[in-house]
Image (tube, rainbow, N blue to C red):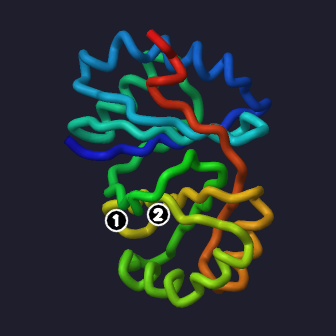
Amino acid sequence: MQHILLERQFDPGISAEDFMAMARDGLDCMPLYRVSWRESLMSNDGSRLLCRFEAPDTEAVRRVAREAFSRARIAWAGTVHDTGREGAPAVVVERRFTTPVTLEALQAREDAAAWCLEQHQVTFLRTFFSQDRKRMICLYLAPDAESVRQAQRQADMPVERVWSCRGFTERDFGD
């Protein structure tokens, strides 16, 4: 099984209740495609949604999304790199690269500027790194998105977008 990230955008944004209903709609067909949902991160304004699955391939996740009538879906396979630190992600950093990069090179840059994270009370939690090495999603525990933005700027890290989020896991469904 692979880790698959599904990216969605909504205009206007959706509510937490809208997300929960959409997720419940997709739960029934997931076993048909051998897809397991692991977590979702929704921007505070409801305009962006990242969902992480384990599945045989990206097409299986796209099929589940179509069954749940999901819009604006981009799915990609990648690896998960967890720091083991505790905490629910509060901020997402999206990175895109024109040429493939290595996780080690980016991690070395961030490690060299660890003081920036500490200065802004930012804790790095987890990274999703695409198989083509051109896309990365990083999750942080932080007071707000601006703290992460400042730390990333001071560390001279590549950033496409930074946003505050709310996380969802199976615990939120209580079924």
In the depicted structure, whether residue 29 falls above or below residue 43: above
Residue at (70%, 68%) from the top-left corner? 121
- What residue is shown with label 2? 135
- What residue is shown with label 1? 132
Q: Quadrant of the C terminus?
A: top left
Whether residue 91 appears in this view of the structure is yes
In the depicted structure, whether residue 128 falls above or below residue 45: below
Q: Quadrant of residue 128?
A: bottom left
Along the viewing direction, whichever of 120 and 35 lies nearer the viewer: 120
Residue at (37%, 69%) from the top-left corner? 133
Q: Quadrant of residue 144?
A: bottom right
Circles 2 and 1 in contact, beta carbons < 8 Å: yes
Along the viewing direction, whichever of 108 and 13 lies nearer the viewer: 108
Whether residue 8 appears in this view of the structure is no
Along the viewing direction, whichever of 1 and 83 lies nearer the viewer: 83
> Would residue 35 appear left or right of 64 to someone viewing this image?
left
Amino acid type for the residue under numbered disc 1? Asp
Query: Whole-percent x and y of residue 135?
Result: 47, 63
The secondary element bearing badge 2 is classed as strand
Mark 2 nearby-residue class (10 Å; few <14, some 14–19, many ≥20): some
Query: Whole-percent x and y of residue 78?
Result: 33, 55
Mark 1 nearby-residue class (10 Å; few <14, some 14–19, many ≥20): few
Amino acid type for the residue under numbered disc 2? Arg
> Would residue 39 appear left or right of 34 to someone viewing this image?
right
